[in-house]
């Protein structure tokens, strides 16, 4: 095909001979350049999100009292936030002296889990994810990782203390 | 300067590649946001890596795009 052969007018152009103002002002190279710049910006955003996610997991929290043990009945739960105010957590009093605590965020898509007394498990109602009561391991459903565990202990003052959070 | 039919087709193909890569980037940002929500660092870094590679590929394609 000759280099000098004129490009035929497309049929759609003959049928709809309308021209928008400034139609010829952006070349395909410029358009592609905008797309590449957009792709670069999104890539930078993805890297930023990865760094932010990493930094959040580094913050495991400082030891602090959560609640008085006697104010939580055996088999009862207590909601709190740890390590930051943006991290919902849940504590379960297993028996007279034993308590366990986990991040309340389901590891599937971040919905909050709650304790199902009759089933004796942590349950996520969004997609029916279930976790073991004492370990937080996945029992069933779409989650692939166990619940984030929060180390807790009952101290002499009768308070339950949160010590640190562990993502697993 | 007029482009040959082949040149126009090549440019169109490259442009479509760039558009597809850009669309995939939009998908990846949703995956990264999901990883952020559930504190999954592994998934977040994997997504960021793929996203950077795709952005570099889109920039490389731009070199072969005619005006």
Image (cartoon, coloured by chain):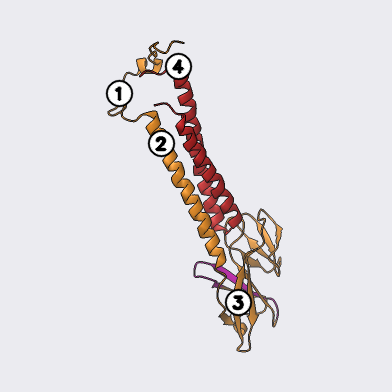
Residues packed near mark 1 inside 10 Å, few (<14), some (14 to 19) or many (20 plus): few
What SS does tag 4 mark?
helix
Gap in angstroms between the C-alphas marked 1 and 3: 68 Å
Which dot, 3 or 2, sits closer to the camera? Answer: 2
Gap in angstroms between the C-alphas marked 3 and 2: 51 Å
Q: Quadrant of residue A14?
A: top left
Residue B46 is situated, as x and y percent measured from the top left of the image, at 59, 50
- Pinpoint the chain carrying mark 4: B
Q: In this view, does A145 lie to the left or right of B50?
A: right
Q: Earlier in the sequence, mark 1 or mark 2?
A: 1
Q: Name the residue rendered at 39%, 29% in the picture.
A: A28
Q: Chain A drawn in what color?
A: orange
The residue tagged 3 is: A163
Gap in angstroms between the C-alphas marked 4 and 2: 22 Å
> Do the residues indicated by labels 3 and 2 lie within the same chain of the protein?
yes
- Pinpoint the chain carrying mark 3: A
Relative vertical location of residue A34 with respect to residue A156 in this rendering, above or below: above
- Pinpoint the chain carrying mark 2: A
Which dot, 1 or 4, sits closer to the camera? Answer: 4
The residue tagged 4 is: B5
Residue B58 is situated, as x and y percent measured from the top left of the image, at 49, 37
Q: Earlier in the sequence, mark 3 or mark 2?
A: 2
Which dot, 1 or 3, sits closer to the camera? Answer: 3
Gap in angstroms between the C-alphas marked 3 and 4: 69 Å
What SS does tag 1 mark?
loop
What SS does tag 3 mark?
strand
Q: Name the residue rendered at 62%, 54% in the picture.
A: A127
The residue tagged 2 is: A33
Asked if residue B50 lies in the magenta stretch, the reply is no
């Amino acid at each position: 095909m000759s280099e000098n052969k004129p490009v035929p007018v497309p049929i759609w152009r003959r049928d709809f001979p309308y021209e928008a103002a400034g139609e010829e002002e952006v070349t395909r190279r410029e358009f592609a350049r905008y797309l590449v710049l957009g792709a670069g910006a999104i890539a930078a955003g993805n890297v930023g999100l990865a760094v932010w996610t990493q930094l959040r997991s580094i913050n495991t929290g400082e030891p602090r009292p959560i609640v008085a043990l006697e104010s939580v009945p055996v088999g009862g739960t207590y909601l709190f936030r740890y390590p930051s105010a943006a991290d919902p957590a849940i504590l379960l009093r297993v028996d007279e002296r034993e308590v366990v605590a986990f991040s309340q965020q389901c590891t599937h898509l971040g919905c909050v889990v709650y304790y199902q007394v009759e089933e004796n498990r942590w349950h996520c109602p969004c997609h029916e994810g279930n976790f073991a009561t004492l370990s937080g391991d996945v029992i069933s459903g779409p989650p692939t990782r166990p619940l984030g565990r929060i180390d807790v202990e009952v101290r002499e003052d009768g308070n339950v203390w949160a010590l640190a959070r562990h993502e697993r | 300067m007029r482009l040959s039919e082949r040149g126009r087709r090549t440019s169109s193909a490259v442009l479509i590649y760039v558009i597809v890569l850009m669309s995939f980037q939009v998908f990846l940002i949703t995956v990264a946001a999901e990883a952020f929500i559930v504190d999954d660092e592994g998934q977040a870094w994997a997504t960021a890596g793929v996203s950077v590679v795709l952005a570099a590929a889109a920039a490389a394609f731009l070199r072969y795009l005619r005006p």
